[in-house]
Amino acid sequence: MTSWSSRKEPTRRQVVGVMSLNLAAALLACSRSTQGAITALQQTADQHDLAILNLVAVDYGDRTDLAGRTVTGTPAGSVVLRDRPYSIAVSPGGDWIAWDYWSARPYPEGAGAKFRIVLATTSEPIRSFTFGSWFGGILAISSKAQYVALINGGADGSRPYGLVVADTAADRIDYDLTDLVTRFPLPQVVRLSLSGSGGRLVAGSADWFTVIDVPSRRSVYEARGRYPSLSPDGEVLAFLDQDQHVVLMALSTGAGRTLVDWPERVSGIGAWSPDGRYLLAGVSDPISLSNRLIAIEAATGNAVDMMPIGDLAGDRCVWIKRGFLSASSVLG
């Protein structure tokens, strides 16, 4: 079994992604975005004190680094977590980070340690809660980290995988939604997304997704698609259809529109801005043979070029409060 207590060099994929981000300002190609669109994006980021965080982490063994950028691609600092997280989630407002530890994975993947979720913000002490002998999977958190959704299972094999939503303040599971996901096995979930209130949840595999109304414990929409992402108010779902087009679906009416006016192929969908105005996405550039991160203005479907991201898909890019990036301490 590999020991993560000793220093571990980053993988080639991690290094390439971070190097691409470091070269963002110099390599940004001519943009089809108007200066007005770029200015509006910058104003939104400034108004909400936001930057872009890449959740593809660089693991150094005793710490894990997440790179931050401004919306124009310049370095904005980093978030440093203690040890090696298994899953990392950021709240819809960008003001909370949640993660668990790889050591809680069962043998031989992990060390079988007690499963613990850590919650951090810039204005309060770090707190955590545990789930006994269960180990965790993909995470999602609501605004102010009131609720955490996760895929979990029994470390000793006695408990099958489940999809649950926990109240972090009460340290208890409020909703067991396991039976509502029928199109794919829960171990195949690669994306969870919670609305700001925690009232809506989407769980997605590589091919299908299911949208759940949490309080009523019912499935409200499911379809083929990838990278499902809920708007902060839970009213709009973005996903990538089978033709690699971005679809915006109004969940209350079932009305959807497909955005097809771009020459590039969309590689992945990230997070919504806290005001629901912009959606992060990655697109492939056939000229440079690498990907770029864009911000899609939901109301118009227009795209604003932001920065190169190398071979990363853009699905792990989120909005983060700049206070996290200016902090010099290690979280955890």
Image (cartoon, rainbow, N blue to C red):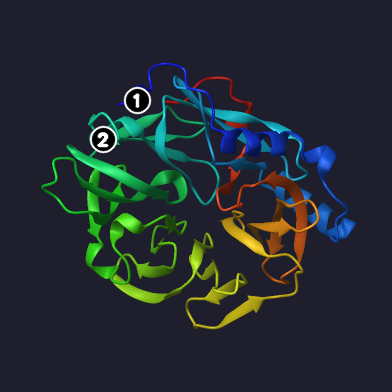
Residue at the image position 79 percent from the left and 51 percent from the top: 288
> Disc 2 and disc 1: Cα gap in Å?
19 Å
| Left/right of residue 307 with respect to residue 148 in the rendered view | right
Q: Position of residue 29 (x, y in %)?
A: 85, 50
| Left/right of residue 208 with respect to residue 235 in the rendered view | left
At label 2, the amino acid type is: Phe
Residue at the image position 47 percent from the left and 79 percent from the top: 252
| Left/right of residue 272 with respect to residue 166 in the rendered view | right
Residue 258 sits above or below residue 312 on the image: below
Q: Quadrant of the C terminus?
A: top left
- Name the foreground residue: 283 vs 152: 283
Q: Position of residue 40 (x, y in %)?
A: 79, 56
Quadrant assignment, res 62: top left
Q: Position of residue 154 (x, y in %)?
A: 17, 45
Q: Which residue is mark 2?
A: 115
Q: Which residue is mark 1?
A: 2
Quadrant assignment, res 206: bottom left
Q: Quadrant of the N terminus?
A: top left
Residue at the image position 53 percent from the left and 20 percent from the top: 329
- Name the foreground residue: 332 vs 307: 307
Residue 193 sits above or below residue 325 on the image: below
At label 1, the amino acid type is: Thr
Helix, strand or loop at label 2? It is: loop
Helix, strand or loop at label 1? It is: loop
Number of marks drawn? 2
Q: Position of residue 127 (x, y in %)?
A: 36, 31
Q: Furthest-left residue in view?
A: 158
